Each structure stands twice: as structure tokens, then as C-alpha cells.
Image: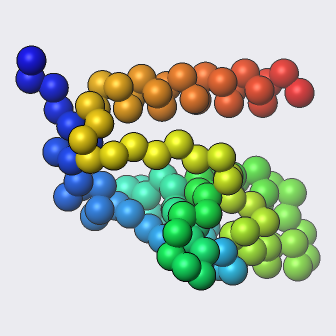
């Protein structure tokens, strides 16, 4: 069986990886996400461990209601903390399937409000 592993896309993934600290400002993160190759940033705590992620969708929702100093929101106040990760030895089809399932659940949760 010729199954690709996550490690096979490591170089491309690393080239698109953007990391910010929990105190990064929303406006700075929006600037990073303006790059068409970047769809999310990883938010790390002071110890360097992943604390969450912020996507373009998170930014659009927040900026849509932004006024005054609200745009000076910190990354820690916006990031998604429930993040599923994968390992270099995971099979890409399995990872993609997991991502699709999580997206479907998130969409269902959002639309049911």
C-alpha cells in the first residue's frame, strides 16, 4: 500500500507555518493572515507550547464587529483552544478525513445557534 504520511508534506507545511505569542494583537495577526498561503496562525504560550490557533474566519468575525479599542484584542482572547494535531507518521488520508469531520461538526455547531 502506497500511503502518504504527514511527514511527506513537512517542508511545505513548515514554509507556511506562522507562530505568534498569546499577547500578539489581532491587527498584527490579521496582517499575517493577509498572505494567501497562510490560513491560520499557531498561538504559543511563553513556554513555546501550542495554546491554540487563529484562522482567517476568526479574524473576519471579530473585525466585523470591531470598534475603537476592540481591535487591540490579544491572541489569547480569540484563539481556538480545542485543537487536534497530527504526527509525521500519520497517514494523510486519515488526517484529511479527520479535518473534514471536525469542519462538519464545527459548521453544524455554528449554524445551530
Q: Tell which residue pokes out farthest to the top in this image.
A: 1
Of residues 10 and 90, the one drawn nearer to the viewer in this rendering: 90
| Residue 51 screen position, x and y as percent | 61, 63
Q: Please name whichever residue, 113 or 57, is drawn nearer the observer in this view of the structure.
A: 113
Residue 17 position in % (x across, y down)? 38, 63
> How many numbered discs, if any?
0
Query: In the image, what residue occupies the spot 28% across and 64% down?
Result: 15
Identify the residue at image location x=30%, y=25%: 93
Observer able to see residue 10: yes
At a point 9% along the width and 23% down the height, the residue shown is 2
In the rendered image, residue 19, in percent from the top left (x then y), is placed at: 48, 71
> Does residue 5 appear to the left or right of 22 in the view shown?
left
Vertically, is 104 above or below 69? above
Question: How is the rendered protein coloured?
Answer: rainbow
| Quadrant in which residue 76 is drawn | bottom right
User: Which residue is situated farthest in the left direction here?
Assistant: 2
Residue 66: percent from left, percent from top? 85, 64
Query: Can residue 33 be seen in this snapshot?
Result: no
Residue ID at (89%, 27%): 113
Name the quadrant containing residue 46. Answer: bottom right
Residue 29 appears left or right of 111: left
Quadrant housing residue 86: top left
71 lies left or right of 106: right
Q: Quadrant of the N terminus?
A: top left
Amino acid at each position: 500500500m502506497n500511503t502518504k504520511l504527514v511527514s511527506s508534506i513537512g517542508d511545505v507545511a513548515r514554509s507556511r507555518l506562522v507562530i505568534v505569542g498569546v499577547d500578539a494583537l489581532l491587527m498584527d495577526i490579521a496582517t499575517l493572515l493577509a498572505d494567501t498561503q497562510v490560513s491560520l496562525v499557531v498561538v504559543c504560550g511563553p513556554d513555546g507550547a501550542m495554546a491554540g490557533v487563529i484562522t482567517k474566519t476568526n479574524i473576519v468575525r471579530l473585525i466585523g464587529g470591531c470598534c475603537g479599542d476592540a481591535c487591540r484584542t490579544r491572541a489569547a482572547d480569540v484563539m481556538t483552544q480545542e485543537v487536534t494535531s497530527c504526527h509525521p507518521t500519520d497517514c494523510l488520508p486519515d488526517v484529511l478525513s479527520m479535518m473534514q469531520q471536525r469542519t462538519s461538526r464545527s459548521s453544524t455547531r455554528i449554524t445551530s445557534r
